[in-house]
Amino acid sequence: MSPPYSLASHSAVMHTHGKLGELNKTFRQEKRMEQDFKHPTFPVVLQAKANGSGTAFKDPAFMENRAAPVHRWVPWIAGFSGAFVDSVLAAYLNRKNSAIVLDPFSGVGTTLIQAAIRGYNVVGFEINPYATLATEGKLKALRVKSKVLTDTIEALQLDARTWRNGRAVEEAAPESFQSRIPFYSPRIKKQVLHALGFISKIEDDRVRDLFRVAFGSVMVSFSNYTYEPSLSSRPGAGKPLIEDANVATVIMEKLKQIRYDIEWLRREASGTKPGNGRIYNEDFFTGERRIKSESIDLMITSPPYLNNYHYARNTRPQLYWLGLISSPAEQRPLEEKNFGTFWQIAREKEHVALTFEHRGLERILAGLRMINPEKGQYGGRGWANYAASYFNDCDRFLGALKRVLSRGGTGVVVVGNSILQGVNVPVQDIIGDIAEIRGLTLEGIYRLRDKRVGASITTSSARIGTSKATLDESAVVVKKRR
Ligand SMILES: C[S@@+](CC[C@H](N)C(=O)[O-])C[C@H]1O[C@@H](n2cnc3c(N)ncnc32)[C@H](O)[C@@H]1O
């Protein structure tokens, strides 16, 4: 099947009329004249002055990003804030201009955007195509022509006048996208397909990408689903179905925010030379070969936590409706290659053994395996397999980090502990130990915040344990010897 719409290649001449037709013609002319650039570049934000106070990190919560220009375009689970990245840059790079910063699990690009803004060259990997699209859109934002963006928003507004009447819809919904209840009401679906049809005809690829990011960011808000923070049906979360909404208005509000932030960036950027940025939509374990040994001065990352948050499933709407994947077969690798894989995959295996020696962790896993044996893969055994897979990937990750870090280079891993079947797993401590096993030096494990008190993944019906547990977050800081 074909995706709901496809990216128009630069050379493809699209038959568009009216305002968008004129914009596309101008774009084609300019594209021919324009020197192509190797790496997207962009400057400044400066939402918080780097505090330069050693390990006094800023709160890593992504919350702050929700209000921060550019970072706020796409909400993403378990990220950290631009201010946190700033404090790490100040603590470990000290304005070393030529430094290269890596984020191997870059999400929607907080590390990459913030470090590039500060003038550092950045490289990142992200397995999820939607998160990658968001990062790319941000990295290229300053190369977007304001007038083209404004004119295309206006063209959308004009086009949308006929979305809610009888005009025939040209686009098709993604065939393989399935949901328990209709994802969109008929009235909304029609508008959504018109919106996607409009976006697919924008030839300026940077502007088109920003429209796609805007659509992806808001598309669940007018659906019958909601983030809780996992994707659930609205009735399941006690919320009413959405029969009708003005889809164009919601998308345009997001686009106006994006346009506002780009203008803000331009003002902040004047006089600053931004770093070069590169994001690979690739599994880090496959992609790490792209990075030269001993070339990275600082790594700042937050890998998936040991909490089975299912990035691939939770972004299915964006992945399918934006045409980033078109079948479950394309979704599967995103799940299998996800850091640590998912409980749903690991639980089915007979016995996942650790690929390295760690007595304490082995004891935790052995204890877990003994919980609820009668539940088979849904009992402790399944969770022990999941934890073992997760830590095996921690080991691979730290091995790769050891290779790519320059001598004297630093790695900062933001991660939290987990409670599996009522058993506390001190992820941060174990990651610190694995780093040392891998030959890195552990500078310290710095508590960033007590995240929440509550029953985390311990209370799902498939799991046992109702104890209140404290979940916290720390920065594990490792160094490579000189
Ligand atoms: C905790 S989030 C990172 C959030 C990021 N710090 C931010 O602020 O946006 C972890 C990310 O790792 C990505 N990921 C999972 N497995 C990966 C892999 N094997 N290679 C690259 N990225 C992966 C997930 O898709 C997710 O976006």
Image (spheres, rainbow, N blue to C red):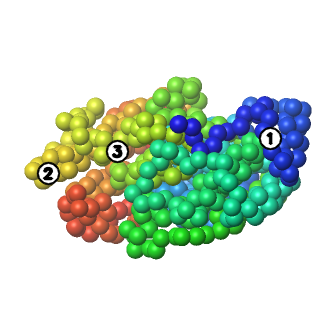
Picture coordinates of residue 304, whole percent (x, y): 42, 48
Residue mark closest to the camera, 1 vs 2: 1
- Three-letter residue code for mark 1: His
For the residues bearing labels 3 and 2, Cβ distance under 8 angstroms: no
Q: Is residue 61 left or right of residue 418?
A: right
- Three-letter residue code for mark 3: Phe
Picture coordinates of residue 72, whole percent (x, y): 63, 60
Residue mark closest to the camera, 1 vs 3: 1
Whether residue 197 is situated above or below residue 8 in the rendered picture: below
The residue where tag 3 is placed is 342
Q: Where, by quadrant of the figure, is residue 473 drawn?
A: bottom left
Residue 15's disc is 1
Q: Secondary structure at mark 1?
A: loop
Q: Secondary structure at mark 2?
A: helix
Question: Distance of mark 1 from mark 2, alpha carbons?
Answer: 59 Å
Front one among 408 and 101: 101
Picture coordinates of residue 383, whole percent (x, y): 24, 48
Q: Is residue 178 left or right of residue 453?
A: right
Q: Where, by quadrant of the figure, is residue 24 drawn?
A: top right
The residue where tag 2 is placed is 375
Res 260 seen here: no
Picture coordinates of residue 8, whole percent (x, y): 71, 37
